[in-house]
Image (cartoon, rainbow, N blue to C red):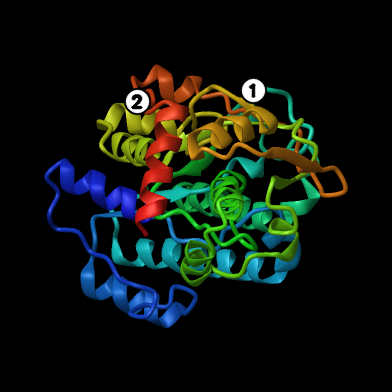
Amino acid sequence: MVGSALLRKLKAEGFLNLITRSHTELDLTRQSEVEAFMQAEKPEYVFLAAAKVGGILANNTYPAEFIYNNLAIQTNIIHAAWKAGVKRLLFLGSSCIYPRDCYQPMKEEFLLTGPLEPTNEPYAVAKIAGIKMCQSYNRQYGTNYIAVMPTNLYGPNDNFDLETSHVLPAMIRKFHLAKLAVNGDQEEIKKDQDRFGSIPEDIMADTAVANLWGSGIPFREFLHVDDVADACVFIMDLNEENFAFLLASNPPALINIGSGREISIKDLALLIKDIVGFEGDVVFDKTRPDGTLQKLLDVSRLTALGWKPKISLKTGIRATYDSFKKI
């Protein structure tokens, strides 16, 4: 999702010499393959957006895959980038790097000041290791590697598989399925299953109800993926003085990317319900985990450099739902 948004942004800005590989062409968990690729291509700038990601269910179900794959991918790329003489590298992390009970809004300097949220700790530990790699390579080798911590992202090319998706795309699909079920549109439900994966039985048990995980009480911050791509290109294109400022900040080479605004999961559900057009009831399953109760990023460091998001949450969700229906 982020990679495709970065490509759209870079092409729109006139950058044409873009080097990409699909997973079938290059396995980023294989050190020898990554180093051979970097040495052959010698890129000047690297956007490290590749990762294994997912929501609470996926993190709880596949913790070994989350820590192994993410550690392997980022270790291979960061080290190979140094060996290939990359000019600047941008590593995308996640807001889950901050402590579970972190003071809000979360400043960059709150990193490693408390225990992590248990439901996604392996993923968070891997991302923290990526931050420390960027800082360590800058310190020892004088590289210009920076770690950016985006908030919860959504948008075109998101993952709508209900076993591995994040909360916002999962809600879009659940409300869409509930609407189809109420209308008795079994043909479209079958098409949905073919496109996005299996449908858990509890979702279709009562066609007049949309079942959602947790209490609905937690607050989350969301950012459209085109906005985070815009922010990443903005940071990568900073002049030497401002880029050096980020590298020397406290902590060094770390910057949050977010909207600075939050919404409760319950209100998010009602917003998506309205956009999708589902007229039934919403039921929150309180036996399911909520995750961290609040995750709002302090984005003052990025705002001070002159960047701010352009896409409102309502506009972004509507566009995402439109693109979802066209897949």
Residue visible at 66% across and 51% down in the picture: 124
Asked if one can make out residue 254 in the rendered structure from this viewpoint, the answer is no
Do the residues bearing badges 1 and 2 touch, measured as CB atoms within 8 Å?
A: no
Nearer-the-camera pick, 254 or 181: 181
Nearer-the-camera pick, 21 or 73: 21
The tally of labels here is 2
Extreme-right residue of the structure: 287
Report the amino acid beneath label 1.
Pro
Closest to the camera, between mark 1 and mark 2, is 2
Residue visible at 70% across and 68% down in the picture: 62
Q: Which mark is residue 310?
A: 2
Q: CA distance from mark 1 to mark 2?
A: 20 Å
Mark nearer the N terminus (1 vs 2) = 1
Q: Secondary structure at mark 1?
A: loop
Q: Secondary structure at mark 2?
A: loop
Rendered position, 164 above or below 222? below
In terms of image quadrants, where is residue 44?
Answer: bottom left
Asked if one can make out residue 194 in the rendered structure from this viewpoint, the answer is yes
Q: Characterize the local packing of mark 2: few (<14), some (14-19) or many (20 or more) Cα atoms within 10 angstroms.
A: few
The image shows residue 80 at horizontal and vertical percentages of 39, 68
Rendered position, 231 above or below 15? above
In the rendered structure, the answer to whether residue 254 lies left or right of residue 49 reads right
Nearer-the-camera pick, 160 or 102: 160
The image shows residue 92 at horizontal and vertical percentages of 47, 48
Report the amino acid beneath label 2.
Lys
In terms of image quadrants, where is residue 227?
Answer: top left
In the rendered structure, the answer to whether residue 253 lies left or right of residue 239 reads right
Residue visible at 68% across and 54% down in the picture: 125
Residue that carries the numbered disc 1 in the rendered image = 105
In the rendered structure, the answer to whether residue 68 lies left or right of residue 192 reads right
Nearer-the-camera pick, 192 or 148: 192
The image shows residue 152 at horizontal and vertical percentages of 55, 40
